[in-house]
Image: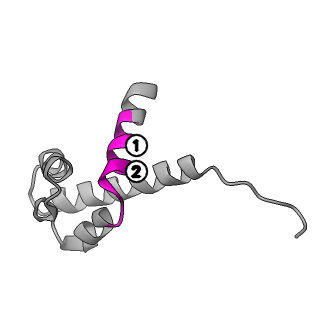
Amino acid sequence: MDKTTLFNIDEITSALVETTLMEVYDALKEKGYNPVSQIVGYLVSGDPGYITTSNNAREKILSIDRGKILEAIVKEYLEN
């Protein structure tokens, strides 16, 4: 193990955000909410009450800075 491994932090962060958003989306949908509306409500207001506690969705989304979530969404939309 004498080789150095390089990690791209932007790729890791993007993957974490994507995975988290999908898990939160699924939890909201499962509970009968409009996931897009609820996630947007959270991102705009910062109020975690928009996110269900089911499947630890609220805890998961709160573990990521809202700015990082917005950055990942904008990058995905504009760069792909």
Which numbered disc, 2 or 1, marks the residue that appears first in the sequence? 2
Tell me if label 2 and label 1 are in contact, CB under 8 Å. yes
| Front residue of this view, candidates 32 and 13 | 13
Task: Residue at 55%, 47% (x, y): give it.
Answer: 11
Measured in 3D between alpha carbons, the distance from the residue under mark 2 to the one under mark 1, in whole angstroms, is 8 Å
Q: Is residue 80 visible?
A: no
Residue carrying label 1:
72
> Taken as a whole, is the magenta stretch helix, strand or loop?
helix
Figure quadrant of residue 19: bottom left
Q: Quadrant of the N terminus?
A: bottom right
Residue 72 painted magenta: yes
Whether residue 59 sits left or right of residue 44 in the image: it is right
Mark 2 is on which residue type? Glu
Task: Residue at 63%, 49% (x, y): give it.
Answer: 8
Q: Which region of the structure is painted magenta?
A: 63-74
Q: Position of residue 56 (x, y in %)?
A: 26, 73
Numbered disc 2: secondary structure: helix
Which of pointers 2 and 1 indicates the residue nearer the eye?
A: 1
Q: Position of residue 23 (x, y in %)?
A: 31, 60
Up the image or down, 50 lies above or below 11; here it is below
| Front residue of this view, candidates 30 and 70 | 70
Whether residue 46 sits left or right of residue 67 in the image: it is left
Task: Residue at 12%, 63% (x, y): give it.
Answer: 31
Residue carrying label 2:
18
Task: Residue at 40%, 43% (x, y): give it.
Answer: 72
> Which residue is most to the right?
2
Q: Position of residue 5 (x, y in %)?
A: 77, 58
Q: Is residue 69 visible?
A: yes
